[in-house]
Structures are given as C-alpha cells and as structure tokens.
C-alpha cells in the first residue's frame, strides 16, 4: 500500500473554495456496482479527473485528493476497485485488501474508469470535456494503461507505478503497451524507491519516446515510494513540485 490510513494529500486547502461532494455508487459495463467519491467544483475549468487509488482501494486519502482537485476548478471522481469482491460499503482500517487485489483484472478497472468518465460527462454542457486519470502505485500503472484502454482521455498521470511489472491477471505492464497509447503520460517517480529501479523508469521514458508518445517522466532523486504524503515533511518540496506538474500537465493537454 502507498499510504497510512490516516495520511492526507500534501496539498494546501484553498480557503473559501466552494465544493460539493458526495459518495456515489456507479455501475460498470458488466452490471457490477462499485463505490466512488465525487467532488464537484462550483466553478469548473472544463477538464475532469478520475482518481485511481493504491491497492487499498477507495479511502480518505483519495477522497481528500478529489476535494483538492475540485478546489482548483476540476471535477474529480475517486473510484474503488473491489465492487465485485468486497461490495460497496465503507471499510474499516482492518480491511484485508490483498485478496481482492489478486482478483482485480485490468479490463475491469478500465470498465470502471469508463463508468466514472460517463458520470462526469453528464454535467450540463460538458459532454466533450477533457478527462485525465491520476493514480498511485497499483493505480499509477493502472492510470498509464488507460492511455491504451480509453479513447476519451487527454492524459494519464501516475505516481510511482511500476512501468514493467506484468499485471496479476497476466496482462502486460505499461512499458510493453506504449505502442497502444493514445494520450500523453506524466510519471512522477521516487529516485529512492526500493521497489522500482531507476533503470526501469529510464527504460519507460525511452520506450515512450520511441513510440512518439508525449511524456514527462520526473524522478525526484532522494524521494521514496509514497513520498506524496503531507506527513513526509522531508519531501514537502518534491510534493509541491509534483502537484504543480499535475496542474500544468492538465492545462497543457486540455
């Protein structure tokens, strides 16, 4: 997992921002209901963001992140992965997520993202809005894979996803599918991430360049996995820079 259960995004709240938010139950292509959290800006800038959590699924960190996006003018939906195996109810800190992760399939995640996209497209006068995905760890690589699985996204953002690890359902990892990508990629990586060698990150950049996919692969030299956590005071500057890069990436590709 990426964050402690009591972690929050290292992003300052915007005082006075008007935000509406609610828990949602969305329905995927196969009829499965799954939980989501929707934060709606009162003054949207047009694009919307679909948030793909880490292996724990939907919890407070990602709900707070959706709120931070909406305070900056972007509607956001954070989705849960485990509607098929764990239902739609809220979960406590003792939720054993790994058995559910093992049953999660890439195509199902893609279909759940599609349901979230359809939901944010329903807002009046936003049928053709730009859509971005942003994910963390398991959700980071899942976000990049949306550049292959979705035709309606304008960019895919991933924090410390594994570029080359194949998925638990046997499908190939992001680096092996770059020829299928149809959207720009932003990768935000920790140079001190013990689980993702720098060589693999650099190989991901090389593969994206070779496939002529517009990309920004950022390595924060001394940052570990999960550095984007406001409890990590030592990585405040890296987190602030990463947040700025996300907002700039959205503006650039909208």
Image: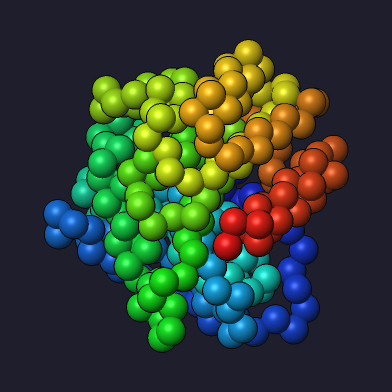
Q: Nearer the viewer, residue 4 or 225?
A: 225
Q: Where is residue 55 shown, x and y percent of the image?
A: 44, 39
Please tell me in which quadrant of the rendered image residue 219 appears.
top right
- Whether residue 2 is visible, yes or no, is no
Q: Where is residue 83 shown, x and y percent of the image?
A: 26, 53
What residue appears at the point 23 percent right and 58 percent down from the top-left corner? Answer: 28
What residue appears at the point 76 percent right and 31 percent down from the top-left corner? Answer: 220
Q: How is the image coloured?
A: rainbow
Please tell me in which quadrant of the rendered image residue 114 appears.
bottom left
- Whether residue 39 is visible, yes or no, is yes
Q: Is residue 152 above or below residue 136?
A: below
Q: Is residue 40 above or below residue 108?
A: below
What residue appears at the point 54 percent right and 81 percent down from the top-left corner? Answer: 20
Question: Which residue sits furthest left?
Answer: 30
Q: Is residue 139 left or right of residue 5?
A: left
What residue appears at the point 72 percent right and 49 percent down from the top-left corner? Answer: 245
Q: Where is residue 160 shown, x and y percent of the image?
A: 59, 33
Q: Nearer the viewer, residue 122 or 71?
A: 122
Quarter of the picture holding the C terminus: bottom right
């Amino acid at each position: 997992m990426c964050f402690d259960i009591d972690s929050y995004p290292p992003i300052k709240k915007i005082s006075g921002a008007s935000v509406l938010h609610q828990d949602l139950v969305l329905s995927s292509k196969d009829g499965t209901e799954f939980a989501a959290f929707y934060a709606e800006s009162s003054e949207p800038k047009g694009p919307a963001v679909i948030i793909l959590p880490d292996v724990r699924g939907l919890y407070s960190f990602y709900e707070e992140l959706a709120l931070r996006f909406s305070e900056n003018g972007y509607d956001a939906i954070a989705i849960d992965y485990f509607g098929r195996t764990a239902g739609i109810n809220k979960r406590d800190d003792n939720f054993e997520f790994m058995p559910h992760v093992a049953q999660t399939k890439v195509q199902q995640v893609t279909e759940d993202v599609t349901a979230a996209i359809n939901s944010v497209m329903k807002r009046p006068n936003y049928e053709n809005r730009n859509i971005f995905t942003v994910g963390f760890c398991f959700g980071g690589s899942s976000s990049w894979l949306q550049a292959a699985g979705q035709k309606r996204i304008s960019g895919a953002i991933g924090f410390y996803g594994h570029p080359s690890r194949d998925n638990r359902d046997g499908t190939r990892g992001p680096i092996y599918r770059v020829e299928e990508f149809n959207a720009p990629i932003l990768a935000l990586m920790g140079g001190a991430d013990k689980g993702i060698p720098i060589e693999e990150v650099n190989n991901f950049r090389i593969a994206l360049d070779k496939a002529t996919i517009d990309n920004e692969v950022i390595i924060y030299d001394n940052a570990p996995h999960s550095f984007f956590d406001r409890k990590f005071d030592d990585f405040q500057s890296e987190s602030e820079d990463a947040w700025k890069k996300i907002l700039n990436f959205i503006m650039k590709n909208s």
